[in-house]
Image: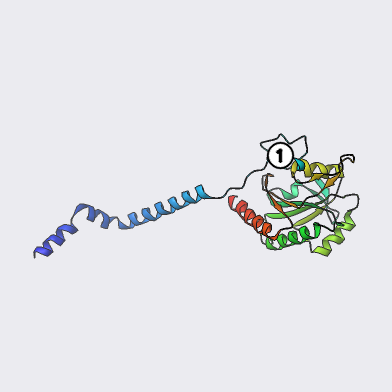
Amino acid sequence: MIGLHHTDCFRNFAPVKFIRQYRIFIGVMLVFSAVTLWLFYSALNRRALPVYNPAMVNPELVDSTVQHVGRYHTVGDFAFVNQNGRRVTQEDYNGKIYVADFFFTTCGSICPKMTALMKQLQERTNAMEDVKLLSHTVMPEVDDVPRLRRYADSVGVDDARWNLVTGDKKEIYALARKSYLAVKQGRPEELYDMVHTENFVLVDKKRRVRGFYDGTDPEELERLLDDIELLRTDD
């Protein structure tokens, strides 16, 4: 009887009675608190991609007129012609994450490696409707539309997602060195001469440069894919 009496007293003890009465609510609040703390911790420890401005980049790759810019840099407007003779502008990439590079069809050094990795990138982002590719020739005087078409066919370009573009050399030069910050100047005595690099340039949906990657290195492709996923999650 004594044991039963003490048990009944324990059951009627106010805090215990409160917990029993509101146990579902308390359980829900504990779970909610745990999830909130985990999300807060994840946000604090999440890797963030830098926003690149000209002042942060190797001056050899940046036009002297913008090397001082330290904030608010975005890719400028452009208008070129692709492998199908269609006009391609910034409007085609609005609201998209895209990867840009520079090449020429007769390049026998790094271009085949870059193109092979860009083809892998095309395949591995095939299900991502918000991701596109953009390759600019640095030899527009050679790479006309028919030549780009043959090159696109030979490497397996998906016309809906990957544009190979040609156009005015001055405009390509300006975009490469003032917007993408990714191409070296060629012979100083020849106006708008360019030496393309192995850079793949990652651009976000706000037209900001978010990363540079070695387009000849398969390991860099994996890093690029991770960063694309990070940008997609941010959006």
Q: Nearer the viewer, residue 157 or 12?
A: 157
Crowd around label 1: few <14 · some 14–19 · many ≥20 (10 Å): many
Name the quadrant containing residue 53: top right
Residue at the spot 70% in from the left edge and 60% down from the top edge: 218
Name the quadrant containing residue 4: bottom left
Q: Which of 212 and 168 is in front in this view?
A: 212
Element under label 1?
A: helix
Indicate the position of residue 23 as horizontal and vertical percent values.
30, 57
Q: How is the image coloured?
A: rainbow
Most extreme residue toward the left is 1
Indicate the position of residue 190 as horizontal and vertical percent values.
90, 41
Amino acid carrying label 1: it is: Pro
State left or right for residue 234 relative to residue 112.
left
Q: Nearer the viewer, residue 222 or 32?
A: 222
User: Does 6 appear above or below 196?
Assistant: below
* Residue that label 1 marks: 54
Count numbered badges in the picture. 1
Is residue 158 visible from the viewing direction of this image?
A: no
Q: Give the quadrant of the N terminus.
A: bottom left
Indicate the position of residue 167 as horizontal and vertical percent values.
86, 47
State left or right for residue 25 relative to residue 227.
left
Q: Which of 135 and 62 is in front in this view?
A: 62
Is residue 15 visible from the viewing direction of this image?
A: yes
Residue at the spot 65% in from the left edge and 59% down from the top edge: 222
User: Does 171 appear above or below 22?
Assistant: above
Indicate the position of residue 103 as horizontal and vertical percent values.
81, 53
State left or right for residue 205 relative to residue 20.
right
